[in-house]
Each structure stands twice: as structure tokens, then as C-alpha cells.
Amino acid sequence: MSDQKTFDPNAMNVGKYLAQRLSQLGVNHLFSVPGDYTSDLLEIIDTYEDAENKPFIYRIGNCNELNAGYAADGYARAKGLGAVAVTTGVGSFSLLNAIGGSFVENIPVVAIIGTLSNSKLQDEINAGELYHHNVSTEDTNRTVYSPVTVAFERISNPLTAPAQIDTAIIACISKSKPVAIEIMEDCYYMPCAEPQGMLSPIPNYESLPVLQGMADQTPSNKYAAQIVKAIEDAANAVYAKIANGKPILWIGKEISTKRLQGKFAALQQAIGAPYVTSFLGKAVVSEDNPWFLGMYDSVFTTDHTNSYLNQSTAIIGLGVWNTDLNTFASKSHETGNISPVFASRDMVKDGENLYVQVSLEQLIDAVMALIQSKGCTSNWTQPSPPSPPALPSPSTTITYDNFFAVLDQHVNQDHLIVADIGLSSFGGSSSLKINRQDGFLAQNLWASIGWSVPAGLGASFRDDLRTFVIVGDGAFKLTCQAVSTMVQEGRNAVVFVLNNKVYGVEQMLLDAGPYKAGSTEPFEAANVLQEWDYVSLMKGFSNNAPSAKSAVVNTVGDLQNILLMIESDPSSTYMVSINLKERDYPSAWSLFVNR
């Protein structure tokens, strides 16, 4: 706690400035863990109110820093921008994993790190000794966070604080990646300038360093002309593949992060082509569309989807990231002699041809212009949807497949699915039909198990939707305390714990032998989990709060009944244990089991 409260409490200060800037951008909640280097900031957050006597930002306490970071990530995915505040060292290092995931997956999160005061830092330098939580007198947090942020600002002077805060936040929202703002504890209450205007993303922010690097090339429009030609060449290459053929559009994550859903919809309608998504891009547009075929990767694509892919004359990847868990790092996503076009990360790759500094939006606009001037008629007729699977009788033992089949019939536009990575992801949660844009959240590239539970907490602040978390029991054990925070904050989230008592995906990838029909082969000892009593756990997390409900599902009928109960109880927090057999697995994994 600093002595800076002697300043005028009604004056603008560094803590208020930060809170107001975040609030202006729709951040109404700050996820945090208390620490002495952030105590003044959290006090400001709790007491700083607007003209209607409402807090600019509500502080949400978390059980640990990792959960706080995941919650901010989920909040950003659901609402556009997230923020988390922790103390230096023990807090910032614990937070790092979450920020790493946000960086890799292009999620805009502002990480606020409270650190020791100017005077304490000088004491360390003079005495050669460390204050608690600190690693060294060096700029350690900058060193640690630089690889996973697009801006790092250390605030030690209130005069420069407004510009530093604005610089970091603009980088965050322009690049859709995390930033870190480290604030010395004696600065929070120090007076500073009032916020001026509103912050907004800078168009083509990614290209600015490149343009600056070309400063020695004159005239200045030389580089611009090269970009224009690259856009034209890329658009012509794509147009040649889609005109008068059977193209399939393969859309990915960047359609969402770059807010291109409307432009994609116009392109798809103009071409009259079916579309598929990558796992990373699931539900970037609504899947309630007759032209939607399903998810496309190299392993878990359904027979229905493959039947159309095998007829296609071109596959155009728009915003798809070609990663191992997204396309399973396999050339089997090439259909026949067709190699997909990949347009993402500001470049277009068409076989051996690479067009750089071409943004996805520029490409779509240029292709649309060609369609409007030259026309484009695909040879597709509107696909026929596959028949939904028949549900087994209510007395049937619950399995992965019938869990997702029943859930699929229940999920609607009022739900937000937050799915963990694991055995249940591919061919499980990925098979759910999501009838709203961005109605499915998953961390499928960073793939940190346990992410979904605190991310579901953060996403649940999207108050117009009810959050359904789907998580395996092994992953749940890493971050389960977030359920306690859900209860504390009155969130109506529902957590489905797929309880098979093993790290299923680890066992499957190591040795699928135990999953073969009739096998008695034991599971690898490291993959066997201690079983938990989830009903009692919920009571412990909530101190028997009446708003905290739990249930156990052993049969299809149990699941149907609990879903009806959840639907009739829109205010409570639920934790539901789906009791699966150890050797059960989603049928989509049969390729691994029978190889």
C-alpha cells in the first residue's frame, strides 16, 4: 500500500485513467488476484464510479492468476477485449501461460502488472537486495512478456502514463493480441491528464513497421504499387479457380478476428458455393445455413462433408491457419490433385505462388469486384443436409457419442459453447451445430488443458447468452476453482465434466490399445486419474449455496432430464458429471484406434 492517497480523491489519476480507457472500449470487468503491489489499483477500481454512481469496471476476484488470465481471454473472445491485473513475479509469472495462449490465438487482452515503487527499486539497486516477489533489479517482466505481447509499457512517471497506456491499448486492439502494462505501485494515485477522445484501432497497423523499413525507397508510392499488384494477382488467381467450377470455401479464425463475417457472407452468396470451417474457425459464422457442410481437417471430416470435397474443383482457404491441430499437419487435406489456396496472415499461398502483404479483407474485396465485373456461376446445387442420428432409448448408458447427440438437439442461439481441448474435442464438441455467429469458443492452437473452465467464467459475462462449458475430468482438475468464482459472481454457466477417469487423449495418442474392441490392456499409469465426487465438490465450492446445483448423468434419460431442469432454471450455476466408461471414446477417433 502506497502513501499516494494524499492526492485529491476527485482528481484524475493513473489508476482512474486506465480504468476509464478500458471502460470506454467495453471492458466492464477486470479479472484479478489481490497482491500488495496492486492493492491501490484494485481499490481505485472498486471505488471509481461514473456520473450514475456505477463502477467504471467491476473487479472479479479469482482463485489464482492462471484462472484470471484464462477468464480475461474468454471474456475477450466473447466481448471483444479483456483485462487482468496481477502482482509482479509470483503473479505475473503464473499469468504467463494464459497470455501466451492469447498471443498465439490473436486474443486482445490487457495484462496489468503491479510492481514495486520507484523508491523500493532504488533501494534494491543501492543495497543489492531484493524485495519480495521480485526476481532482480533488471526489467524482468519486460524480458518475460516481450515474446507474448505486442507492446510492453512500464509506467514510473504519471506525466507519461496517459500516453503509455494509450499506446499499449491501441496496439492491443489494432493487432488483436495481448499487451502488458507494468505500473509502479507509487503511481496509481498520482494525478495525470484526463483522457482525450476515444481510442480506436489503427488500420493496417501490422504494415506500419514494414512501411517504415521501406523509407529509403523513393518515390514513396513504389511500395504501395507493389502491394496493389500483389492484390490484383492474388485475386485473379482465386477468381480463376472459382469461376465456372465447383469451389468450396474453407473459412478460419481470421474471418472472426478481422470482423469479416459480412463480407464472407456476400462472397459465398455471390459464388453460390458450399463452405466448411477449420476447427479453429468453428462457428465464425452461423452453421445454420444450407450451404454449410461441416468441419474440414485431415482426420475427423465426416463422410457427408467428404462426399462434397471429393467433387470440388478448388478449395479456397480464407483465414485458415495451417497448424497441426487445425489441419493435423497432413497433406491428406488435399483432395485428389487439388491443393488448397491459403489466404491468411496477410499473404496468399497458391501452390508455389506466394503473394505477400495482401490482407484477407483486401483479397475478398478484390475477388468480389471481379465477380461483379465478370460474373461467376458455380456448378453446385444447394447441398442436402445429413439426417440427424436417431437417439437411443432413455435407459441407454451414456457415451461420448450419445452425449453430444442429445446436447446437439438442445443447443440453440441462446447458448455459448466453451470447449476444452482433448478426446471430446474432435468429433465431439466440434460436431455440435452452432446456430449463431461466434457461438463456439475453444483454444485449439495453444491447447492448454483446463482453459475452458475459467474461460467459461469470463465468457459468461456475455449476459445475453448462457455459457455451456464442456471439459474432460483431467483438464477440469487443473482449473476447477473457477466454478467457485462462477457461484460467487452469480453466473448461470453450466459445466459438463466428461468423467472417464483417464487422460483419454494422452492415452489415445500414446497407445490406443486399451480402446480396441474387447481389449483388457491397462491404461498407462500416468494417465489414470483419481476419481472425484463432483456433487460434494460443488457443495464445497459453494458452501451449499442454493444457486449452485450439481447432477450426475449415467444414462441418456438422465441427460435429457438435467437439460430440461437447466432450461427451467436460468439463474443457477450447474456442474454436471457425465459418467463415461473408461474405454469409451468418440467414434470419430476410430481411425486412431484401428490403425
Image: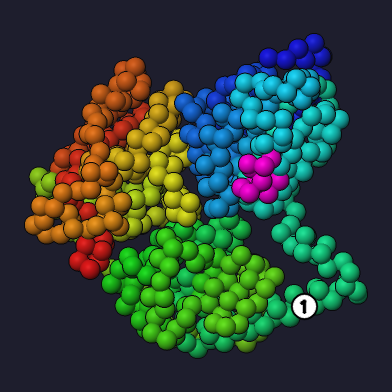
Instruction: Residue 476: say if magenta.
Output: no
Label 1 Cα neighbours within 10 Å, binned few <14 / some 14-19 / many ≥20: few
Location of residue 586 in the rendering, given as x and y in whole percent from the top left corner: 24, 56
Is residue 455 something one can see in this rendering? yes
Above or below, 453 relative to 46:
below
Q: Farthest right residue? A: 219
Q: Residue at x 40, y 41 (%)?
A: 450
**Residue drawn at x 81%, y 74% as measured from the top left:** 223
Asked whether the viewer can see residue 429, the reply is: no
Left-right relation of 45 to 497: right
Please identify the quadrant where the N terminus is shown. Answer: top right
Q: Is residue 190 left or right of residue 495?
A: right
Q: Who's the residue at 44% across and 42% down the image?
A: 451
Residue 103 position, x and y percent, is: 58, 49
Q: Quadrant of the C terminus?
A: bottom left
| Main SS, magenta residues | helix
- Expressed as whole percent of the image width and height from the top left, the position of residue 184 reads 73, 26
Query: How many numbered badges does the structure rendering display?
Result: 1
Residue wearing tag 1: 226
Magenta span has 143? yes
For the record, the magenta segment spans: 142-151
Task: State whether residue 2 is above or below residue 551.
Answer: above
